[in-house]
Image (cartoon, rainbow, N blue to C red):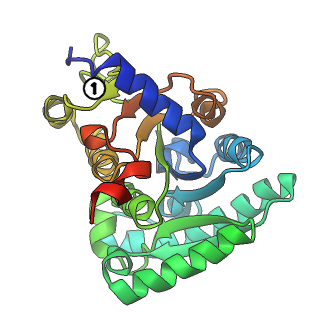
């Protein structure tokens, strides 16, 4: 079991997460599809319900959504084994994914927008400025932006599943107050919970990050390896003063609980106790 961060810091970070005005939510493929790679209507509707819990509290929400490749695989009777196959599958799945999001959000009369990105869009100053300007306008209009990696051209992102890092880069770049990563496990564990019945959930990650990183690297498998990039993404947000949470997408009212200050998933504390409220004051 890893050392537990200071209780006072945990509670303060949980409060900051609850009070966050601008939230980036990342949903993974397994949070949206079934075992046959078909979009799961119940899972998708639950995600939308959870996001609208935040919207109804007056929060700005940006959704970084995986699932295009998975949804595409479920709609074409073709193998999707090579990078080229997956790129093609993503073009089929992306339109289907957005159609379902549109239908689900319309239950709340909530408008949405699609933005496709690659890592280059986030590191090129001019391209990122254009992205941020569009994003800020959409948020002013009360629209929920749905961001996904541009799988049709982003070969490296397909290979490493980089939506986890894209979500953290977006959170940092648009001055978000909170990053929530929703996945198919309840947080970060001391082992792979899919294989180790004795694995325990780690409540919070702060000064114990190096130990947690070693645990994740040791417990990662082909099926569970994605937790590594989720932990890395959360840490990147932390290094810029942004609290982060990795939680299970099937947890009832998961985002409402976070907004209520309830302990959910694994909480990542801003580095050195910094918060997004103080970063600008300390970094000249």
Give the quadrant of the N terminus.
top left
User: Which secondary structure, mark 1?
Assistant: loop
Q: Residue at x 38, y 56 (%)?
A: 168
Residue 121: quadrant of the picture: bottom left
Give the residue pinned by disc 1.
192
**50 above or below 171?**
above
Give the quadrant of the C terminus.
bottom left
Q: Residue at x 62, y 35 (%)?
A: 259
**191 above or below 209?**
above
Please give left or right for residue 35 compared with residue 260 in the image: left
Which percent across, then down, holds residue 68? 52, 63
Which percent across, then down, holds residue 116? 50, 75
Residue 283: quadrant of the picture: bottom left
Q: Choose between 89 and 156: the one closer to the eye.
A: 156
Identify the residue at the far top of this view. Answer: 198
Q: Choose between 270 and 274: the one closer to the eye.
A: 274
Which percent across, then down, holds residue 216? 21, 34
């Amino acid at each position: 079991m890893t050392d537990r961060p200071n209780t006072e810091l945990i509670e303060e970070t949980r409060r900051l997460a609850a009070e966050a005005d601008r939230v980036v939510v990342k949903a993974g493929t397994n949070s949206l599809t079934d075992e046959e790679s078909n979009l799961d209507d119940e899972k998708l509707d639950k995600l939308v319900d959870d996001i609208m819990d935040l919207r109804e509290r007056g929060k700005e929400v940006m959704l970084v959504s995986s699932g295009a490749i998975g949804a595409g695989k479920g709609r074409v009777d073709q193998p999707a084994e090579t990078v080229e196959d997956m790129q093609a599958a993503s073009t089929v799945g992306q339109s289907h994914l957005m159609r379902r999001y549109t239908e689900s959000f319309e239950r709340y009369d909530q408008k949405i927008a699609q933005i496709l990105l690659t890592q280059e869009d986030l590191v090129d100053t001019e391209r990122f400025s254009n992205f941020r300007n569009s994003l800020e306008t959409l948020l002013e209009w009360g629209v929920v932006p749905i961001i996904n990696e541009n799988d049709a051209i982003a070969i490296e992102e397909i290979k490493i599943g980089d939506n986890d890092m894209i979500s953290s880069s977006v959170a940092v770049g648009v001055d978000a107050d909170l990053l929530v990563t929703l996945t198919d496990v309840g947080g970060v564990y001391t082992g792979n919970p899919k294989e180790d019945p004795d694995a325990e959930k780690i409540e919070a990650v702060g000064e114990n990050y190096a130990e947690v990183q070693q645990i994740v690297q040791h417990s990662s498998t082909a099926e569970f390896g994605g937790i590594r990039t989720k932990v890395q993404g959360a840490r990147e947000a932390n290094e810029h003063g942004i609290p982060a949470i990795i939680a299970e997408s099937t947890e009832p009212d998961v985002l409402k609980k976070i907004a209520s200050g309830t302990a959910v998933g694994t909480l990542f504390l801003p580095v050195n106790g910094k918060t997004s409220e103080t970063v600008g004051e300390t970094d000249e």
